[in-house]
Structure formats: structure tokens, C-alpha cells
Image (spheres, rainbow, N blue to C red):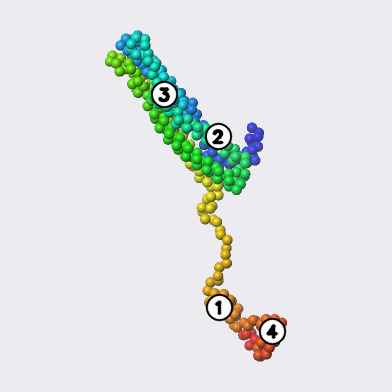
Amino acid sequence: MDVVNQLVAQGQFTIIKQPLGFIKILQWIFAIFAFSTCGSYSGMFKMSVNCKNQSDSNLAIEVEFEYPFRLHQVYFDAPTCKGKDQERLFLVGDYSSSSEFFVTIGVFSFLYAMAALSVYCFILEKYRENNKGPQIDFVVTAVFAFMWLVSSCAWAKGLSDVKGATDPKEVIKLITACDEQGNRCFEGYDPRVSGLNTSVAFGFINLILWIGNLWFVFKETGWLAAFGGTYAPSQEKQPAPDSFAQGGYGQPDPYAGSQGGYQPDYGQQGGYNEEGGYSQGYEQQPTSFSNQM
């Protein structure tokens, strides 16, 4: 307990308070609910066969079934109403593929959510380094979201078929003695499938959680900035505008001065002076022609 408190004090679990970590906890919890409610299910229903000869009747036929719902392997013995003879009958259907697929996705989602949560809590900086961790996380999260969609829909259809195959009213039709006049067959106890209904609900809740988590993982990938157009290209030199209006082909105007007057460029290598003579240079250059007047 002291170790946990120390980690909390060091800020190791602050990510849990953020949507990225909090949703991972919800994914971890609801994945457990989904595969446990389906994978641990076992049900039973009862029927009664009342023959003309009461001694041949069986008023408490019990049929038990469970995950993974290979109903074609589930059998029961029913009276033939012809003495003590009985017939062995099997239920119809094999729905193991959809149920096992659903449970498998739930187990792997649970393991991945637990692993990702550990990474968030203990090596978050390494996870965010070069955005490689978030990008992988985004792809895996998208795959699990798709798998939850497929598995939940498949299991919802499979559950509907399981309900039909284990309905006592439908199973009674398999008993030969129930077709004979004078014999009466009726259901005694329907299977409880509320747990299986809950598993389907948990499957679609997981689908919502994994799809919602895509946005928060996407913001960690760095792709949002690229899509937002924040990339700044290198600057290139552009030609000066209105270069012809500034005195020629991109050259500065020699007639433009700070006081609007003419400013000849007297260099230090000599030139003509104001009296028309030639000079070797001036120590100080005149600022403008108007100042020399």
C-alpha cells in the first residue's frame, strides 16, 4: 500500500485522471464483464410428457446446456409411451463459433487494455517518444473497435438462434410420442438467458468505448497537427515588388533622399567637385546638393 501511495505522490498515475487512461480502465472492466457473462453461462429447461398410460409418463425431463453452445451434442431421453422404452434425442445447432469468437475478443481486449494502462502509468514518456507508441496504439485500438463490432453482431445473432433451439415449445416437436393422439406434452421450465442478454449489451458497450477511445489516442499521434496545416515550408527569396518604379531593374533610386534633394554619391576614390574640377576625394561627403547652396 505504501508503494502505491508513493507512486501516486510521484505522479505515476495522473494519466488515470485523463480521458486516455480513464477510458482504458473502463475498457478493461467491461471486457471482463463481456467474456465472463458469456463464457461462464450454463442453463437448463424442463419438459413433461404425459402418456395415456400414466406409468410410461415422464413429467420432469431436464435438459442442460452451457457455453460454448454446441447444442448438437446435448441430448436427453424421452419416453415413447410404448412401455418403458425411451428414445434419445439431440438438440439442433452448433453456435460455438460466434460465442467463442466473442469471448476471445473480450479476453484479448482485457489483456491489451491492461498492458496499455501499464505503459501509460510507468513509461508514458517513452510511449510518446517520436509518436511511435501512440500511432501503434491507434492502429490496435481501431482493430479492436472493428472486432467488437463484428463479434457483438455475430453473438447477438447466435444468441437469437440459441434461444430458439432451447425453447421447450420447439424441443417438444422433436419427441415422437408428442405426435400421437392421447399423449400430452408441455413445457415445464424455460431457460434463463438474462446473463446472455447482458453479455450482448456489454459487447456493444465495449464497441462504444473503443470507438470513443480512438479520438483521444489520435490526438497523441501527432497526425492532428499535420492535418491542421501547421507545417511551415522554408522561406524563399521573392523579387522586390514594383522594381521598375524604384529607379530601374531592382536598383535603389539615386534621386531619393531623406530631404527630397539630389544626393550624388561622392566616393573616397575621387570625382568631380561642384566648381567643375576634379578632386581625389573628400574626407566628408556632402549630405545633399541643397545643403551646399
Q: Earlier in the sequence, mark 2 or mark 4?
A: 2
Describe the element under mark 4 as helix, strand or loop: loop
Q: Which label sits in the foreground, 1 or 3?
A: 3
Question: What residue is pinned by disc 2?
Answer: 111
Question: At label 1, which amino acid type do we have?
Answer: Gly
Disc 1 + disc 3, Cβ < 8 Å: no
Q: Residue at x 52, y 55 (%)?
A: 229
Q: Which label sits in the foreground, 3 or 4?
A: 3
Q: Earlier in the sequence, mark 2 or mark 3?
A: 3
Describe the element under mark 3 as helix, strand or loop: helix
Q: Residue at x 39, y 24 (%)?
A: 92
Q: Earlier in the sequence, mark 1 or mark 4?
A: 1
Question: What residue is pinned by disc 4?
Answer: 270
Question: What residue is pinned by disc 3?
Answer: 72
What is the spatial separation of the Cα atoms under label 1 and label 2, in whole angstroms?
74 Å
Residue 148 in sight: yes
Identify the disc placed on residue 259: none
Describe the element under mark 1 as helix, strand or loop: loop
Q: Residue at x 63, y 35 (%)?
A: 4
**Picture coordinates of residue 147, whole percent (x, y):** 48, 37
**Picture coordinates of residue 26, whole percent (x, y):** 52, 36
Residue 210 in sight: no
